[in-house]
Amino acid sequence: MRYIPQTAGDVSRLLEAVGVARVEELFASLPAAARLAGELDLPAPLAESELQAHLGALAAAGPTGPCFAGGGAYRHYIPAASDHLLRRSEIYTAYTPYQPEISQGTLQIIFEFQTMIARLLGLEVANASMYDGATAVAEAALMIKRVAKHDRLIVSAGLHPQYLETLRTYLKWTTLRIEIAPLGADGRTDYEALAGRIDDQTGGVLVQSPNYLGVIEDTRRVGALVKGKTTRFIHAFTEPLAFGLIASPGESGAHIACGEGQSLGVPISFGGPGLGLFATNPKDMRAMPGRVCGESVDHDGKRAFCLTMATREQHIRREKATSNICTNNGLMATAATIYMALMGREGLRETAQLNHAKAEYLKGRLAAVGTLPFAAPTFNEFAWIPKRPATEVLAALGEAGMIGGLPLAGFAPGLENAVLTCATELNTREEIDRYVEIVRSL
C-alpha cells in the first residue's frame, strides 16, 4: 500500500471546501491546553539494548504490590494458556477478514466470540467487538436515535463519569438530549424519579450495573419500567464478570447491552487496550454498529464463516452511515474468547463468587475503620469514607507498596473524601488484612 501525502495545493482546496482557512481551525473545539503548541520534546534515540534497560527501569519504578483499584479496569488472573495462544503469529498478525476464503480461522474466532458474549449478556445477537466500553456506550446512544426516533436519553448518575464524558462528546452535534436521573440514598438509581421522567418522547434509558460506585442496580425493575413502550433500555457495564453471579442484561429486559470486556482475559496494561462489548436483539440488529460474523456453507457444502453484516460504509453513505466504528478489537476479542473457553460457565461463576466474597470481607472490615455510605449490595468494588483524609490514606497504602483504590473527589458529588476500593480473586486474605491494619494505624 502506497502512502501519498497531500500537496499544499490539495490541503488548500480541502480547507476551502469545508470553509476554514487553516488546519488548526479544525481542532478549535479542543481546549488550548490539550493541543500541542510546538514540537514534541523527545529525547535522542536509543539503541535497542538501551531502550530495553530504560523500559525495565520504568516498569520497576511502578507499584509491584497488591492492587485494590477498579473503577473500570480490573485485575484478574489470566490463564497461562491464553498468552501462549495469543502469541501464535497467525493470531496476533491477523487483519480484517475481507477475503473469507483465506480468513476462516479469524472468522471462526469472531463467530465463537459473538456466541459467548451473546450467552454471557443474555441477548441473541452480539457484534464482533468495539474499541472499548466508553465508545460502545456512546454508539448505543446513537443506535437509540436510529431505532426509537426520539431525542431524549435518560442516563443514570451511576454511569462511569468518563463514559458520560465520551457520551456527551459523541452527542454534541446531534439532536439527542441527555437527562441525568439521580441516585437514591442507597447508591442505586432513584427508580421513582426515573419512572417520572419516562414519556412517549423518551428514546432510551441508560443504566450501568454494577454502577460506577460498585452498586448492583435493580435492573429488572428498570426493564419493567420500559416494557411495552418504544423506549429502549441500555444496560451498560464495566465489569462483565459480574454476570457470572447476577442477572444478565437480557434477563433484566435490556434491549442493548454494552460496555467494557477487559476483565475477560485482557491485562490492565497501564489503562489499555480495552475491549468494547455490544449485544442486542434481532429486531434492532440492522441498526447495530460494528460487524457481525455469520455461519454459512461453502461451494462444497462445508461449514464456513463470513462477514454477514458490516457497517464499514462511511466511504459510501458518509454522514448517513450507521457507525464510524468500522472495525473490531480483534486481538483483544481473541483473548476474551480464549479466556471464556478456558474458564467455562462454572469457572466464570466461581471466579465471580470469589470476587464478591473477597470484596465483602474487605468491606466488612473497613466498616470498622470508616463509613460505608451506601446500603445497596455491591459486587467486587465499593465506596467507603475513611476517618482520615482520603489522600493521606492512599499515600500510606502507597508507601506500603499497595494501590489502595481510586479517590472519588471530582467524580462523585458528595463523596469528596471517599475511596472506591476493589478486591478480586487475586487479592489474598493476608493482603486484605494488611490493607485494613494500615488504615487502622493512621
Image (cartoon, rainbow, N blue to C red):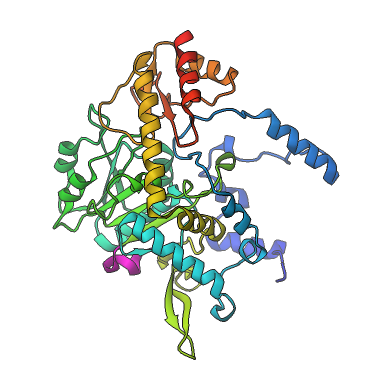
Magenta portion: prevailing SS class: helix
Can residue 21 be found in the magenta stretch?
A: no
> Could you say which is closer to the camera, residue 161 or residue 261?
261
> Could you say which is closer to the camera, residue 363 or residue 29?
363
User: For the image shown, how many numbered marks are present on the structure?
Assistant: 0
Q: In which quarter of the image is residue 310?
A: bottom left
The residue shown at (43%, 65%) is 319
Question: Measured along the vertical axis of the image, is residue 256 above or below residue 408?
Answer: below
The residue shown at (58%, 18%) is 400
Q: In which quarter of the image is residue 20?
A: bottom right
Q: Can residue 289 be seen in this view?
A: no
Question: Measured along the vertical axis of the image, is residue 438 above or below residue 320?
Answer: above
The residue shown at (38%, 42%) is 352
Residue 337, image x, y percentages: 48, 58
Q: Can residue 272 be seen in this view?
A: yes
The N terminus: image quadrant: bottom right
The stretch of residues the image draws in magenta is 281-288
Residue 363, image x, y percentages: 36, 24
Can residue 286 be found in the magenta stretch?
A: yes
| Residue most extreme to the bottom | 300
Residue 105, image x, y percentages: 55, 72
Left or right of residue 88, residue 234 in this image: left
Left or right of residue 38, residue 409 in this image: left
> Could you say which is closer to the camera, residue 23 or residue 364?
364
Question: Measured along the vertical axis of the image, is residue 182 above or below residue 285?
Answer: above
Residue 388, image x, y percentages: 43, 11
Left or right of residue 393, residue 398 in this image: right
